[in-house]
Amino acid sequence: MTVDVNIFNQMILEKGAKNSSVIEVSGIHFDPELRKACEQNYCGNFGKNWTCPPLCGDVNELIKRAKQYTHAVVFQTIHTLEDSYDFEGMTKASKEHNTIVKDVFKATKEMIGDNSLVLGAGGCSECEVCAKMDEEPCRHPDLAITSLEAYGMYVSKIAHLGGMKYINGQNTVTYFGMVLFN
């Protein structure tokens, strides 16, 4: 199935992304070592969310999967904070971003079926509490969204590839998502 990237880009912007850009997957720098940052567990999801390391799978296998695609639309959401310590605002912004990623995911499935890979920021938030916390299998594997970092991607470099800023000024937080396709 051929993807009209202009229509695809427009759909992502209509879903609420601030910016989006088409890039070639061959231009993405993958680094398996990036996953070591996840081991620091700053977000608290390491080993507690099916889409987070180490549960999401071997990083080299995920990189191999991503490299099967030729193109990607990288997109960003930019949110204003009260100040640089506005953790409540960051959490709210993360939820807003994840809602947009879910909307993009659903629209992507309608447009091109299962011939794509949608990645977001942080662990999947489809369920209020991940089934992993109850030692159960993922409740919605068809809706689960893994992060760009789990796939060994440096988001700052992807932002640059897409002609976007990684940091968008004082008192803002920026989140990224991506749809990979052929």
Image (cartoon, grey):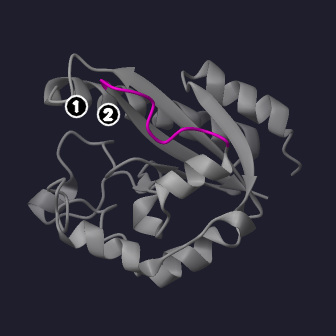
- Give percent across and percent down for residue 94: 31, 33
Q: Nearer the viewer, residue 136 or 69?
A: 69
Judged by its main secondary structure, the magenta piece is loop
Residue 62 shows in the view: yes
Determine which of the numbered discs, if any, sits on residue 109 in the image: none
Element on which disc 1 rests: helix
Which residue corresponds to the image point at 59% horizontal and 70% vertical from the top-left?
29
Is 167 included in the stretch rendered in magenta?
Answer: yes
Task: Give the residue number, with chain letter if any, for mark 2.
Answer: 94
Is 22 included in the stretch rendered in magenta?
Answer: no
- Give percent across and percent down for residue 150: 40, 65
Q: Give the residues in magenta.
A: 163-171
Q: Nearer the viewer, residue 162 or 95?
A: 162
Which residue corresponds to the image point at 86% horizontal and 39% vertical from the top-left?
4
- Give percent across and percent down for residue 101: 48, 37
CA distance separating discs 2 and 1 = 5 Å
Left or right: 104, with 137 as reference point? right
Is 62 placed above or below 77 here? Answer: below
Circles 2 and 1 in contact, beta carbons < 8 Å: yes
Quarter of the image where one finds residue 128 = top left
Q: Amino acid at mark 2?
A: Ser
Task: Give the residue number, with chain letter if any, for mark 1.
Answer: 91
Left or right: 146, with 29 as reference point? left
Q: Nearer the viewer, residue 108 or 152?
A: 152
- Give percent across and percent down for residue 96: 37, 26
